[in-house]
Image (cartoon, coloured by chain):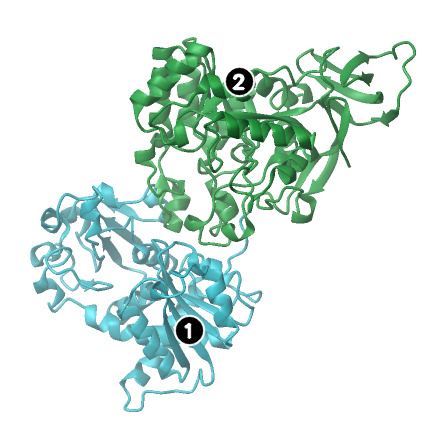
Chain colours: A cyan, B green
Amino acid sequence: MISTNPQLNRSGELQHLLTTEGLPATILLEILDTAESFVGVTERDVKKIPLLRGKSVFNLFFEPSTRTRTTFEIAAKRLSADVHNLNIAASSQIKGETLLDTVNNLSAMYADMFVVRHLQSGAAHLIASHVQPDIHVINAGDGSHAHPTQALLDMFTIRRYKQDFQNLRVAIIGDILHSRVARSEIHALTTLGVPEVRVIAPKTLLPAKVERLGVHVYHDMAKGLKDVDVLMMLRLQNERMQSANLPSSEEYFKYYGLTQEKLSLAQHDAIVMHPGPLNRGVEIDSAVADGKQSVILPQVTFGIAVRMAVMSILAGN
Amino acid sequence: MKIHIKNGRLVDPTNGIDAVNDIFIAAGKILAIGDAPDNFHANRVIDAESLVVCPGLVDLSVRLREPGHEYMATLESEMGAAVAGGITSLACPPDTDPPLDEPGLVEMLKHRAKNLNLAHVYPIGALTQGLRGERLTEMAELSDAGCIVFGQSDVPLTNLRTMMQAMRYAATFGFSVWLRPQEASLTNDGVAHDGEIATRLGLPTIPVCAETIALSNIILLTRETGVHVHLCRLSTLDGIELVRAARQQGLSITCDVAINHLHLSEMDIGFFDSNCHLMPPLRGMSDRDALRNGLLEGTIDAVCSDHAPVDEDAKLLPFGQSEIGATGVELLLPLTLKWGIEMRIPLITVLAKITAAPARILGIDAGHLSLGAAADLCIFDAEQYWRVVTSAIKSQGKNTPFLGMELPGKIKYTLVNGQIVYED
């Protein structure tokens, strides 16, 4: 049976951040506006504010990650929280402890917030539906399902460079099928009123009925990139070549890799984004990744402010 | 024990009876219907006023979890749940541990079931040794031990030559082969229908063609070997059309659908509800509607509970890691009634799908109220709705997508061989 949106509390405020799907634009904008106020903090000499003082944030990473875990850690520390990093892939899961047992044990250590990454879609939902009501869960990536803070920092970046969302053409390029980032970006973009969201990929890397998410589907970069304002590249995992999704990274690069030449088909002031880590020469050419239209490094910087915003809003609700 | 059931609404699809009448039982058999036989002195009179009296239900797929999976459920718990659901005959798939692939195991299971003195148990013998899909089992020996049909349960039979030879061998002895059509190489780690919901939730998928390609192979091999095939738990519109065409060509094929698939679709997964982690996966709305219509027009013969009690903890995992299955024996009648009410079908036609039709598929003398037949009966209140809550479920498995729902049909009595084995 379909239940109510599990990430909102009874007052309609954000209780957990699990996915960008189903969140009202007001909440997404509140996060972006709050993040805007934190950008200044990250640029100060003393980079700490006491909003989460005395709170315990547990980073539960059931799947390896460097960048996301680090930015969450920095964000929590800048809010003065106590941060505990658990690399669970290497410990209790191997000993046979279940996901909920792990979470219950940590809850008993007075956790206030869990930041969760897991290789299974729905893991963060499961945790959120079983924790005490005063604990908040942030999904830092679950399987192919969602990666909402990545999508939010992408929205933040777009707004920084393009001011508003109402007149944009945005293209998401690459492995949509396996990408939690793409799903979260699509929901955030459509909720924020972007009139045209495109996905560009070979048919083997697109999920069934993807157009039902509100996107236009392209298989040809030349057509898909025409007049686009924002290009959101996706990382291509090497295992896609082993599982008959693609013949080779070379052919992928030739047809779907972003080069200066293909980029020139987009608007002259288009920005290029990528959630990292980059596969140079596979989905993106170095000249583009390091070029003047690239905003890949600012994305990382904004990621800290956005994660601070999410944590502070959750802690206040 | 002589029992007089009076004033009940007798519904017997096989004999075309739907009328208020009395029924008299003695020595485990139906002795008379209508007037009391001479000198009949009942030990027990059951007042069935405003209740339905029908043949005991026959369920084509009930996992009893014994041997090997007793932590999920036991023979005792599940047989008790079955009779509480009005089921008097059930077929159990061979996917136990070890699988039902040798006569000793089957004899043991039959023996243990018989001692419980509840429903009749019909083990489905493993078609291949260890269900590994390589070597044939001793089907004739297994038949002597009590298996009446043979199948692979949910374990794929990937080698088509093995499948063909297994069918030929079964046909030699007149055994029917039960298969659930799902091509393994198109399934992989899939857990959900390849549709909008899996796309939203980022779940690995099982496309419709996993069913239709397997069905095409099975249908062609049925033609090749002349065996009777029973197809377990269809899930797709395209699959039903293949079956309809095959039956029109005169092939000896029957099929069933599970209660869950008759009512639910991928939409019911909602936010990763692991109670909806079922196999085959819940599919699209058009598939669900085709199953409902296919059952009505007869391409699908019967409804089964696809009972698969699961340990509570095994469902408290992310969707893709959660155990497959749902409890079902106590929901077989309510969910079949619900289908009938929604489709506006006469009760006698509805009950045929869980009595006469599955009995015919199993090849057993059950599912009817003929004079002299074993007194396997189910007495229920068709008008009474009850809420599906864990405390109301007798099965050791408490997980079902229908938790919290109000469903029609409350079992009042179940009789097996003239003995009251369940009383509400």
Q: Which residue is nearer to you in this view: B371 or A296?
A: B371
What crowding class fits label 1: few (fewer than 14 Cα within 10 Å), some (14-19), or many (20 or more)?
Answer: many
B308 or A272: nearer the eye? B308
Kindly give the residue lying farthest to the bottom in the view shown.
Answer: A46
Name the element at disc 2: helix
Height in image: B147 above or below A173?
A: above
Q: Residue at x 65, y 38 (%)?
A: B76
Between marks 2 and 1 in the image, the one whose residue lies nearer the viewer: 2
The answer for which chain carries disc 1 is A
Q: Amino acid at mark 2?
A: Asp
Residue B194 locus on image (x, y percent): 37, 39
Instruction: Give how far across and how far down residue A22 sits, in percent.
Output: 45, 57
Residue A51 higher or lower than B407, as above or below: below
Q: Along the horizontal axis of the image, is A209 left or right of B389?
A: left
Badge 2 and badge 1 in a common chain: no
Q: Position of residue A252 (x, y in %)?
A: 13, 48
Query: Do labels 2 and 1 touch, CB within 8 Å?
Result: no
- Per the rendering, the mark at residue A58 is 1
Decide: is B223 above or below B217: above
**What residue sits right under mark 2 in the picture?**
B144
**Which residue occupies the foreground of this view, A142 or B139?**
B139
Density class for disc 2 (Cα within 10 Å; few <14, some 14-19, many ≥20) is: few
A18 horizontally vs B352: left or right: left
The residue tagged with tag 1: helix, strand or loop? Answer: strand
